Amino acid sequence: NATGMPTLEKGVREAVASNGKTHAYTEIATASDGDTLEYQIISKLPSITSASTYLSEYSFEDELANGIGYTKNDVIIEIYKDEALEDKVATWDEASGKFTVNYDGNKMNIAMAESGLAEINEATTVYTTGTNSGYSDCFMAIQYGAKLNSDATVVYGSTGNANTVT
């Protein structure tokens, strides 16, 4: 009878700087050599109801296809109360110390630091009464950029280039 289980999805869009337009994140994007793409990972945080359900670790491993390189030092994490990502309660950048980012070739690891976990578990900005605490059942949106370069393996059709997050 568990509820409030974490979810995970990933979207991509052409960078706003490329054409001056803001597009929605989708599962598919088209890019040419040198184009920057913007990615968004959305995770619904689990239910946090007491110290026994506090998160002790929360991390992501993102992997891009060969020929797509992370722009680095541009990861932003936002916490929202709602699935539509309209009611924002927190914004963290890499300098905040709330999370760490490590790169290993075409993989990026994002891990919540102690201060980030403490805020996720214990913040009082969302719940002031009731059984939930911290950012229980809120949505975490992670944004970052990546650039397509000429080393990319061209994949035509609906299969596209591998691009996963766990």
Image: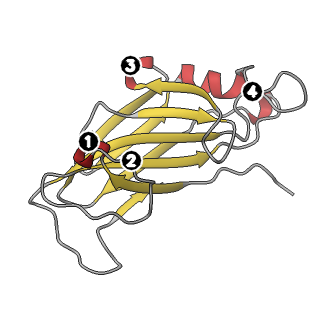
**Residue 89 on image: x %, y %:** 63, 27
CA distance separating discs 4 and 3: 24 Å
Q: Which of labels 4 and 3 is toward the front?
A: 4
Q: CA distance from mark 1 to mark 3?
A: 23 Å
Q: Which residue is mark 4?
A: 126
Element under disc 4:
loop
Q: Residue 63 occupies which quadrant of the picture?
A: bottom left
Inspect the image, locate mark 2, and give the three-letter code of the amino acid beneath it: Thr
Q: Residue at x 76, y 48 (%)?
A: 4
> Which of labels 4 and 2 is toward the front?
2
**Residue at the disc numbered 1:** 17
**Amino acid bearing label 1:** Ala
Q: Which residue is mark 2?
A: 22
Q: Quadrant of the N terminus?
A: bottom right
The reply to whether dot 4 and dot 3 touch (C-beta < 8 Å) is no
Q: Which residue is mark 3?
A: 95
**Quarter of the view holding residue 66:** bottom left
Q: Residue furthest right?
A: 130
Q: CA distance from mark 2 to mark 1?
A: 9 Å
- The tag earlier along the polypeptide, 1 or 3, is 1
Pair 1/3: label in front: 1
Q: Residues within 10 Å of mark 4 (few under 14, many from 20)?
A: some
Whether 88 is drawn above or below 3: the answer is above
Q: Earlier in the sequence, mark 2 or mark 1?
A: 1
| Residue in the foreground of this view, choosing between 69 and 17 | 17
Image-based side of 37 in relation to 22, left or right: left
| Tally of numbered discs | 4
Q: Residues within 10 Å of mark 1 (few under 14, many from 20)?
A: few
Marks 3 and 2 sit apart, C-alpha to C-alpha, by: 26 Å
| Residue type of the residue flagged with mark 3 | Ala
Q: CA distance from mark 4 to mark 2?
A: 29 Å
